[in-house]
Image (cartoon, rainbow, N blue to C red):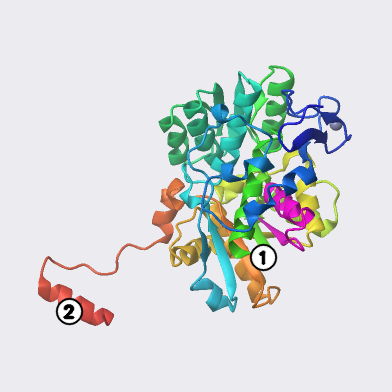
Amino acid sequence: MEKSGNATHLRCDDCGSEFDLRQIVSLCPKCGGLLEVCYDLEGLKKSSHLFSEYVRDSIWRYRDFFPRVQDKNIVSLGEGGTPLVKSVSLGPSLGLDNLYFKNDTLMPTGSFKDRGYSLAISYAKELGVTRGVTYSSGNAGASFSAYSVRGNFPGLVMVDSQASATKKSMIMLYGMNATVLNASNFGQIEALIEKSVTELGCYPFVNFVNPIRHEAMKTFAYEIYSELKRMPDYSFHCVGTGGGLWGTWKGYNELAQMGIADRVPRMAAVQPECVNWLERAIESGADAIAPYGDGTKTIAQSINGNSPLQGGKRLLKAVRDSGGMALSVSDEEIKAAMLDLGHEGIAAEPSSASTVAALKKKAKEGLIRSDDLVVCIITGTALKQPKVVEQIASTPKFEIKADIGELRELLGKLGY
Ligand SMILES: [Zn+2]
């Protein structure tokens, strides 16, 4: 089998069949299972010097840890290399000395999806893919649109009818072909994507069905480890399909397998209460996740799918193998966490703030120790859901005329 840089082959999660990376393939052609990129560990070790210092750069700094892409096919907008911001107010108020926010609101299209799409579009060009489709609740669609258009890659976004008007407009702003997709549950969407592959020969860009996208999420682990010079104790992620959590988990594990880190963090997966299928499956000890809930009942629009892809086995594995947690939060808790993040200087969309809401609950229950190092991944900007921001953030309390006396009086009242 032909190697692709340090990547050696694709392997099916379910039947173990192996496939050449140069083959245009998404789900396992033999059994329909999910494919995972496998690497030559000794080859990866040759690039381990990359983790001895943190250089704020794009995800392509770590290209030795992806399947190989020639320079001419790389489509990049400077994604990755986002700030790891230490908490100055929430952490101390919870008694946590080491709380950090990985601020991916600053990505080119305003969400962490850009990491995955930069790599996935680049790799699709490398393979010579001629027709790509994706489903999106909004953020992924904007990212797919921006990277496809820049890379002159032919694709179609099917955007969830429930996505905010802003999210739909962002997709169109970048100039991509898009359609609104009406479906009553995530199972229907999953079936449509799978048939688009088997019956129409499309190359899909949905997390996991596309075997490459989550490889870029490993860069969360690489950046966090390189900057902190140690592993976090907890890594908090909001979970829709779970590509971010799974990819980050894979990255942490590679660091441990290369002997760079001596352990891996506990993975904390967070969902809205109304669709907490992962929490229910973890609590009941299930081997696969059943669809559950109604995603229209939460403001956390990016993570409101009512079922995972292919039974969510990867998510169950990451949470269980890491000794982690599956958690859920209410909309009220999410709104409070958005304000907490605002007071840290970070404007996060509801889904991202769910991680902070869940952390607060666990810290108050005494589950997190004061010296534990905790990282919450903040995946997308509040500007994607401006109506929620208007609801939760009050308008200014004071009003003055253009009069120096009134300004002096107000400053005095504020104690400045
Ligand atoms: Zn298979």
Q: Is residue 24 above or below residue 311?
A: above
Is residue 230 among what the camera can see? yes
The tag earlier along the polypeptide, 1 or 2, is 1
Task: From the viewer's side, name the closer residue of 335 and 45.
Answer: 45
Q: Residue at x 49, y 51 (%)?
A: 105
Looking at this rendering, what residue extends furthest in the right direction? 15
Within 10 Å of disc 2 (Cα), the crowding (few <14, some 14-19, many 20+) is few
Q: Which mark is residue 350?
A: none
Q: Quadrant of ligand 1?
A: top right
The amino acid at mark 2 is Glu
Q: Which mark is residue 230?
A: 1
**Marks 1 & 2, CB-CB < 8 Å contact:** no
Locate residue 166, reporting x and y percent.
43, 40
Kindly state the secondary structure of the residue where label 2 is placed: helix
Mark 1 or 2, closer to the camera: 1
113 with respect to 7 (left or right): left
Q: If the image is split into quadrants, where does the C terminus sit? A: bottom left
Is residue 157 among what the camera can see? no
115 with respect to 234 (left or right): left
Locate residue 281, reporting x and y percent.
79, 53
Q: Which residue is mark 2?
A: 409
To which quarter of the image does residue 24 belong?
A: top right
The span from disc 1 to disc 2 (Cα, nearest Å) is: 50 Å
Kindly state the secondary structure of the residue where label 1 is placed: loop
Q: If the image is split into quadrants, where does the N terminus sit? A: top right
- Identify the magenta region: 246-270
Within 10 Å of disc 1 (Cα), the crowding (few <14, some 14-19, many 20+) is some
